[in-house]
Each structure stands twice: as structure tokens, then as C-alpha cells.
Image (cartoon, grey):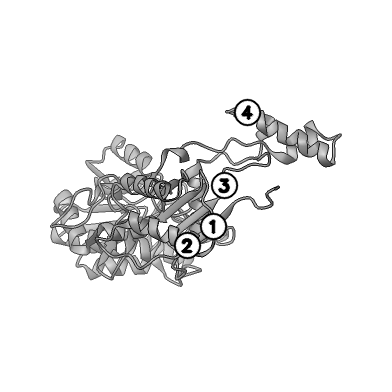
């Protein structure tokens, strides 16, 4: 019988995850309960994914303001800290900032807070491009202090949260007992006019920022990925990403990105295969890699979309563009003849279609980024209660 449905993504309900829970077994049990209740048959290459948030919760991977402060103080001592390129997010950065500021205060030092503008790295706006044009400001060359910024642009609240992040972050720093000076610039080397001790908070451009600062004479450069790479006073940590990918847990603690979790995806894969006979793929996913077309905010504030996945999710799609085949190679065909010709082309396609015109317009992103984005969109970030995603038919094509 001909199949009429392609890819299907389902959110799977799960119990509330607590520290110490066996997250892999909970995923296995939840999926098996769901497929039984909904009369779903699992197939080879179905994908089972679980959000990084519940993996980190099961690991108990948390840290406090005091833990962050201790690590920052140990690294920076009494030197003025140049804190550059923070993301404009209460969830992502407020507790981290409080910890950094407390660490500076422990050393009796000051923070020079340097914002990128007109927006942060992922598109959260400080000021509009139209306002820059109106005032004749070039963000690539013009450096603004706080007084000049306020004179030009006044108070700017985030369009979604209603927060003036310049004031909010300054107040957080002062609340921890540290002095703050605010500037606005997009060249990281500008901070070196104020201090040679830098903590860069950018996510995806962090390696380049560090390289440029060190080449320009910085004495110490750390990124958020260098803070809490090891436990402090029994805290959680992330050996690879540090504070990157963390989220606010309480007013004084953050949930860190999950630590090494390859064993989780392998256990999920093995458990489902043993229970059903289907050789599924498994992954842990975080933020999706997509951009809001209205607000201009890029969703990906985690260091990677997927920190762990099974080997079948390596690589990128290798697909032909059906409309290209229909409009070009088989423009003289229609009906069953067209269908058969396209199916034969799919069956005979090369294993690597790079540069082939028949693949033009397909998405050349990594499978983990594409599937992780689908998972993030399916689960949402609110109260759906579906931290597990079951995807079927993702690897099917028109010839099957």
C-alpha cells in the first residue's frame, strides 16, 4: 500500500525529572508507553530525542552565584574585568552576571561592561538600525560611552521582555558590590583601552574574539566556556562549555549545559532496540538553529544544537530537488511517467550530490542541527510537558 504521510514529529509526555533520575530509562519507558497507547509502530531510523534541560537536571548539574564568583575571583584577582558582548537575556545571563560581578567585588575590582550594538550576537536589539541611520552612527567604527548612548538613543526596552538591559545589567553588577562602567563597541580590542583582563561572553564567535584579543596584547582572556569547567565547592560544571548553555534555575542558581551524555543516547538506542527490534537513532537537543523573521532573534543561544547523538545522525542531507527534476530533466513527462522517472532518479542518485544542480536549493546543514531544530519547535519551551520527541519518516524519500 502506498504511504501518504512523510515525516511526523510527536512530543512525548514524561514525568517531572529530578536530580538522580535515570534519564535514559525514563525516555525508554515514556516512548514505549506512548507507542503502546497510541498504537504506533517504531521503525529503523526513527529518531528519539530528549531535551538537554532534563538531562542536566537528572545529572544535578547546577551552580550558584557564589560558585561562579569563586571561580572568577580565582582567575582575575583584583584586576579590572572587561566583560564584553553579553547576550541580552535574563534567563541566559542574569545569574551568570551576578556571579561574575560578585567575583569582581571579592577582589575589590571594577567591571567595564561592553555591549555590542545595535544588537547582541543572537539578535536581541539595543537600538534599531533606523535609529543608527538617523543619528549618523556607524556601529563598526563608533565607540559610545553611556552618556553618549543615552543622549542619542535614550531608554531602549527589549521589544518582547520590556527590559532596558543596559540599566538592568548595570544594576545587577552594583547589587553585588562592584563598580561598573558601560561602553558600546563591536571591535573586541576596544576593551583593551580599559583593561588587559577580559571575559568575553559571545557564544559562536568566541574563539575568534579570544584570538584577536590575545594578538592585541591582552594579558588574560577567558570566555564563559572557561568558567566552571571544573567543580567549585562541590558545584556542577561543564568541562567543555563552562557557563555556556546555562539557564536560570532560581534567583541564585543556574542549570548548566549537560556534561558528557553520549552514554545516555547509546542507552536509549539500545533499550528501544531490545524492546521493539527497531534500530532507532537517539540524540540530546538544546536550542534550535532558526531565526525569528519578525523580531530578528536567532534562537541558538546554546553552544551547539546537540551535545550528544548516535552515529546514524552524522552528516548532512543528500537530497535531490524534486521541482528541479520536474521542471528540467523531465519537463516533457507527466502523471505516472513523471513519478516513475523521479523515483528512479532518487534511487540512482550519487552518495555525494555536492555541486550537482539537481540538489540546488536543498538544505546543506548538519542533520543534528536540522533535526534538533525540529525537536525544539515540537517541544516548545513552556508548559507542554513533552521533553521527549519521537520523529518518524525523516529519512524516507519519494522513492520509498
Does 179 appear above or below 188?
below
Of the numbered discs 2 and 1, the one sitting upstream in the chain is 2
Tell me where residue 95 sits by quadrant: bottom left
> Would you name the residue on which mark 3 appears?
394
Of the numbered discs 2 and 4, the one sitting upstream in the chain is 2
What SS does tag 1 mark? loop
Identified at 37% across, 53% down, the residue is 85
Per the rendering, the mark at residue 34 is 2
Outermost right residue: 332
- Which label sits in the foreground, 4 or 1? 1
Tell me where residue 317 sits by quadrant: top right
What SS does tag 3 mark? loop
Percent x, y of residue 326: 78, 38
What SS does tag 4 mark? loop
Question: How far apart are the two marked residues, 4 and 1, measured between alpha carbons?
Answer: 39 Å
Per the rendering, the mark at residue 40 is 1
CB atoms of marks 1 and 3 within 8 Å: no
Question: How far apart are the two marked residues, 4 and 3, measured between alpha carbons?
Answer: 23 Å
Amino acid at each position: 500500500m502506498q504511504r501518504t504521510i512523510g515525516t511526523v514529529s510527536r512530543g512525548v509526555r514524561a514525568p517531572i525529572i529530578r536530580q538522580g533520575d535515570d534519564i535514559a530509562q525514563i525516555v525508554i519507558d515514556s516512548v514505549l508507553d506512548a507507542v503502546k497507547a497510541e498504537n504506533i509502530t517504531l521503525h529503523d531510523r526513527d529518531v528519539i530525542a530528549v531535551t538537554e534541560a532534563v538531562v542536566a537536571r537528572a545529572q544535578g548539574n547546577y551552580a550558584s552565584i557564589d560558585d561562579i564568583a569563586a571561580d572568577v575571583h580565582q582567575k582575575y584577582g583584583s584586576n579590572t574585568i572587561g566583560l564584553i558582548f553579553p547576550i541580552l537575556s535574563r534567563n541566559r545571563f542574569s545569574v551568570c552576571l551576578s556571579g561574575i560581578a560578585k567575583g569582581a567585588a571579592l577582589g575589590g575590582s571594577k567591571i567595564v561592561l561592553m555591549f555590542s550594538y545595535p544588537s547582541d550576537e543572537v539578535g536581541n536589539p539595543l537600538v534599531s538600525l533606523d535609529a543608527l541611520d538617523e543619528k549618523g552612527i556607524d556601529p563598526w567604527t563608533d565607540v559610545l560611552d553611556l552618556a553618549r548612548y543615552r543622549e542619542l538613543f535614550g531608554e531602549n526596552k527589549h521589544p518582547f521582555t520590556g527590559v532596558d538591559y543596559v540599566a538592568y545589567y548595570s544594576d545587577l553588577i552594583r547589587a553585588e558590590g562592584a563598580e561598573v562602567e558601560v561602553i558600546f563597541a563591536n571591535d573586541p580590542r576596544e576593551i583593551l583601552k580599559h583593561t588587559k583582563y577580559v571575559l568575553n561572553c559571545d557564544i559562536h564567535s568566541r574563539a575568534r574574539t579570544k584570538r584577536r584579543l590575545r594578538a592585541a596584547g591582552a594579558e588574560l582572556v577567558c570566555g564563559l566556556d572557561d568558567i566552571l569547567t571544573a567543580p567549585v565547592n562541590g558545584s556542577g560544571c561543564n568541562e567543555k562549555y563552562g557557563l555556556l548553555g546555562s539557564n536560570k534555575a532560581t534567583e541564585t542558581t543556574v542549570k548548566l549545559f549537560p556534561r558528557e551524555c553520549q552514554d545516555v543516547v547509546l542507552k536509549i538506542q539500545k533499550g528501544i532496540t531490545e524492546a521493539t527490534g527497531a534500530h532507532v537513532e537517539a540524540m540530546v537537543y538544546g536550542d534550535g538553529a532558526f531565526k525569528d523573521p519578525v523580531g530578528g532573534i536567532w534562537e541558538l543561544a546554546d553552544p551547539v544544537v546537540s551535545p550528544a547523538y548516535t552515529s546514524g545522525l552524522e552528516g548532512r542531507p543528500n537530497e535531490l530537488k524534486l521541482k528541479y527534476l520536474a521542471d528540467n530533466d523531465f519537463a516533457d513527462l507527466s502523471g505516472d511517467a513523471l513519478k516513475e522517472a523521479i523515483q528512479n532518479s532518487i534511487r540512482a542518485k550519487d552518495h555525494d550530490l555536492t555541486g550537482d544542480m539537481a540538489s540546488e536549493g536543498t538544505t546543506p546543514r548538519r542533520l543534528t542541527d536540522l533535526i534538533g531544530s525540529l525537536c525544539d519547535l515540537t517541544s516548545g519551551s513552556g508548559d507542554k510537558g513533552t521533553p521527549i520527541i519521537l520523529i518518524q519518516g525523516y529519512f524516507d524519500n519519494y522513492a520509498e
